[in-house]
């Protein structure tokens, strides 16, 4: 028997909540508006809303309207170490959470994008202008995969600092680091295979895993020590892990950098259990120490590490220039890259190669890293002063991302919704896992033009946490 109209409407709205169209804490359309939108009577909508209240999907607030219950999207499971196939599309939810990064009116604590003051925009502007004036035919040419030989040579030179001795031919240029991660996963795994990932992890890894129909094992990753290698070993004994995606330097979001011993151990585990390490080193050059940390790839004697990085965090995210060192998967990766995009943009490759060649990059990095350290200290002290007692922050030694752990009583999704009402963007912890963890965590980008407005926004966030308790 067909279900009544009000139930159909309720099912439809519940589905929208699951897909992240209405986020936890968000207001849904009023009864009158829904009645007009769906061309049904007010009474039918009221019946549908009351059914949704009974199901615990929404909640009425007197004089204010109907709101999505704050815990509805969370699969509040205990921390579990089992392969997970994503049920609710991470992509849909993330699109909703990340779209605010496009809005100029919002203070962008949420996105992992440095403010343009931390990017060498002026130099790039001059370089692109000169290229278009003197070599306009650059636009008429294809630069086929593996990409510009000059850029690959410059990257090989830079990678000496990370301990890697490479030839330009070991390197393939990609469309950013996300493209490099995607190509790595495609090269090593097939649908249904199991991939170990850090938990919490960068959401682009979760999305790649979802699209490629892989299973993820989330291995806890702490701000002090990074991925828990005892648990990785335990998981590898139990399940056939194909690859492990790891960020050894300044992990996003917790900021961890692996110790020397941990690096040796994770390489040892990959050899012992036969899985490939996919190293994401996109924040590697943003270390606050005098010398950047080594790449895992530098100690990869058996060629089991695939190295991925890009210039998105330090030169120009909009240029979409990254690279991959594929080791024994290089041919396959190059072939896939060619089939997927044929070629890499010539103008941005050449502009970056010129920028690297003229020696200004190290000066630029030194300057930005100093400001990031100042901003970090300011952020930590404002949080200590204005956030509820029990709030903790990570203490990164590089990059520009801070992981904030709120008292358990504060729901970060609700905080996200309230912060947006105040034109403040944060990225709630739920975006960093497939298993509904990190309800009372959020990530904060401090690569911003720090001023009184930013100070005030952090204070407001702190106050919202106190209200939301
Ligand atoms: C850890 C990590 N890896 C990869 C990426 C993607 O980088 P790109 O913009 O170069 O694709 C990001 C971007 O936020 C990131 O944080």
Image (cartoon, rainbow, N blue to C red):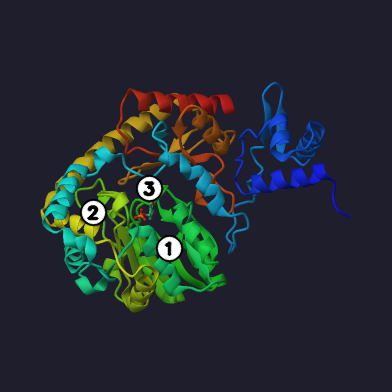
Q: Nearer the viewer, residue 338 or 423?
A: 338
The quarter of the image holding the C terminus is top right
- Residue, x 54% and y 72% (percent of image)? 191
Q: Nearer the viewer, residue 236 or 94?
A: 94
Q: Helix or strand or loop: what does disc 2 sit on? A: loop
Q: Is residue 169 above or below residue 462?
A: below
According to the picture, the residue beneath numbered tag 1 turns out to be: 245
Q: Quadrant of residue 83?
A: bottom right
- Residue, x 49% and y 64% (percent of image)? 196
Q: Is mark 1 within 8 Å of ligand 1?
A: no
According to the picture, the residue beneath numbered tag 3 turns out to be: 255
Using the numbered discs, state the Cα–Cα distance from disc 1 to disc 3 in whole angstroms: 15 Å
Q: Which mark is residue 273?
A: none
Q: Residue 437: percent from the left, percent from the top? A: 57, 48
**Given the current orientation, which residue lies at the most extreme right position?**
1
Q: Nearer the viewer, mark 1 or mark 2?
A: 1
Using the numbered discs, state the Cα–Cα distance from disc 2 to disc 3 in whole angstroms: 14 Å
According to the picture, the residue beneath numbered tag 2 turns out to be: 292
Residue 163: tell me if it is visible: no
């Amino acid at each position: 028997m067909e279900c009544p109209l009000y139930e159909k409407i309720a099912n439809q709205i519940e589905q929208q909540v699951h897909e992240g169209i209405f986020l936890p804490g968000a207001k849904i359309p009023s009864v009158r508006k829904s009645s007009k939108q769906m061309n049904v009577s007010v009474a039918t909508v009221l019946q549908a809303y009351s059914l949704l209240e009974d199901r615990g999907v929404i909640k009425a607030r007197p004089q204010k309207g109907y709101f999505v219950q704050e815990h509805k999207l969370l699969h509040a499971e205990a921390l579990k170490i089992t392969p997970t196939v994503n049920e609710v599309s991470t992509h849909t939810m993330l699109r909703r959470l990340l779209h605010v990064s496009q809005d100029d009116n919002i203070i962008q604590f949420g996105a992992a994008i440095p403010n343009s003051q931390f990017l060498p925009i002026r130099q790039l502007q001059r370089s692109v202008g000169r290229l278009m004036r003197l070599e306009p035919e650059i636009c008429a040419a294809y630069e086929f995969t593996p990409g510009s030989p000059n850029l690959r040579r410059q990257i090989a030179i830079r990678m000496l600092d990370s301990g890697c001795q490479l030839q330009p031919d070991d390197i393939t240029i990609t469309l950013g680091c996300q493209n490099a991660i995607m190509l790595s996963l495609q090269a090593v795994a097939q649908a249904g295979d199991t991939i170990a990932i850090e938990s919490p992890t960068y959401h682009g890894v979760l999305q790649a895993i979802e699209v490629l129909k892989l299973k993820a094992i989330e291995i806890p990753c702490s701000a002090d020590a990074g991925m828990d290698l005892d648990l990785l070993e335990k998981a590898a004994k139990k399940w056939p892990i194909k690859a492990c995606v790891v960020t050894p330097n300044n992990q996003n979001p917790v900021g961890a950098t692996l110790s020397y011993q941990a690096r040796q151990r994770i390489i040892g585990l990959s050899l012992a259990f036969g899985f490939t390490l996919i190293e994401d080193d996109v924040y590697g050059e943003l270390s606050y120490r005098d010398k950047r940390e080594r790449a895992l790839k530098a100690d990869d004697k058996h060629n089991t590490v695939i190295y991925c990085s890009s210039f998105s965090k330090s030169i120009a995210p909009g240029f979409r220039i990254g690279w991959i060192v594929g080791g024994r998967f290089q041919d396959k990766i190059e072939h896939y890259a060619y089939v997927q995009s044929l070629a890499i943009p010539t103008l941005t490759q050449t502009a970056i190669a010129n920028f690297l060649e003229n020696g200004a990059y190290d000066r630029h990095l030194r300057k930005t890293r100093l400001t990031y350290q100042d901003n970090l200290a300011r952020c930590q002290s404002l949080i200590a002063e204005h956030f509820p007692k029990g709030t903790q922050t990570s203490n990164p030694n590089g990059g520009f991302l801070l992981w904030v752990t709120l008292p358990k009583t504060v729901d970060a999704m609700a905080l996200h919704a309230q912060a947006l009402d105040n034109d403040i963007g944060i990225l709630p912890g739920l975006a960093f896992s497939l298993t509904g963890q990190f309800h009372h965590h959020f990530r904060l980008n401090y690569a911003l033009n720090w001023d009184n407005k930013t100070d005030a926004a952090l204070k407001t966030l702190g106050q919202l946490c106190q209200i939301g308790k």
